[in-house]
Amino acid sequence: MKPRRTKIYFDGGCRPNPGAMEIAVVIGGVAAIDRAAGTGSSMDAEWLALIAALRLAQARGLSDFVLLGDAAAVVAQANGAVAARHGAAAHLAIFRGLVGDGPTPRVRHVKRSQNLAGIALARR
């Protein structure tokens, strides 16, 4: 039986926008939440969450995983479908730097209601 691909959910947000950022990553039903991720926009927070998800996958030595988030723009930029401009370009450079020469990780869009990281962030 083939092992299942690991699903890693990511989400970020800020209040107000721009403002104080928070991010969450959920893997294996366990949430890692940073409610003090700095100051920035909601797009910055989403990128920081995606980068944190990739770092977590790498720290666990995972090779077969998919990164799932509800920020369509960040998913499109990470996949190269849309150009990353301004601050997003800097985040994309960090993401690509972490990937290095390895295969580009799968980054997929999910509905907000399916994003376990977003659900974890909503719980206060």
Image (tube, grey):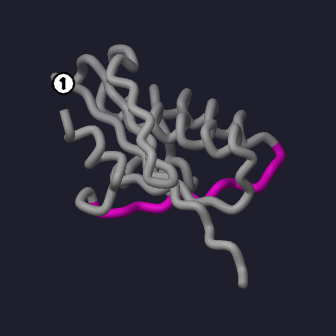
Q: Where is the N terminus found, in terms of image quarters?
A: bottom right
Membership of 70 in magenta stretch: no
Residue drawn where x is 62% and y is 67% of the image: 5
Q: Is residue 64 left or right of residue 107?
A: right
Residue drawn where x is 69% and y is 62% of the image: 64
Q: Where is the C terminus found, in terms of image quarters?
A: top left
Residue 44 x %, y %: 39, 29
Q: Is residue 80 visible?
A: yes
Tell me: residue 108, above or below residue 50: below
Residue 57 x %, y %: 64, 45
Residue identifier under label 1: 15
Residue 66 x %, y %: 57, 60
Mark 1, other Cα within 10 Å: few <14 / some 14–19 / many ≥20: few
Specify the farthest residue to the bottom.
1
Q: Is residue 82 visible?
A: no
Q: Is residue 8 left or right of residue 102?
A: left
Tell me: residue 89, above or below residue 76: above
Kind of element beneath mark 1: strand
The dominant secondary structure in magenta is: loop
Please tell me in which quadrant of the rendered image residue 113 appears: bottom left
Point out the stretch of residues depicted in magenta: 101-111
Residue 38 x %, y %: 38, 15
Please tell me in which quadrant of the rendered image residue 95 appears: top right
Membership of 105 in magenta stretch: yes
Specify the farthest residue to the right.
101
Amino acid bearing label 1: Arg
Residue drawn where x is 63% and y is 33% of the image: 93
Residue drawn where x is 69% and y is 38% of the image: 59
Q: How many marks?
A: 1
Tell me: residue 57, above or below residue 103: above
Q: Is residue 82 left or right of residue 18?
A: right
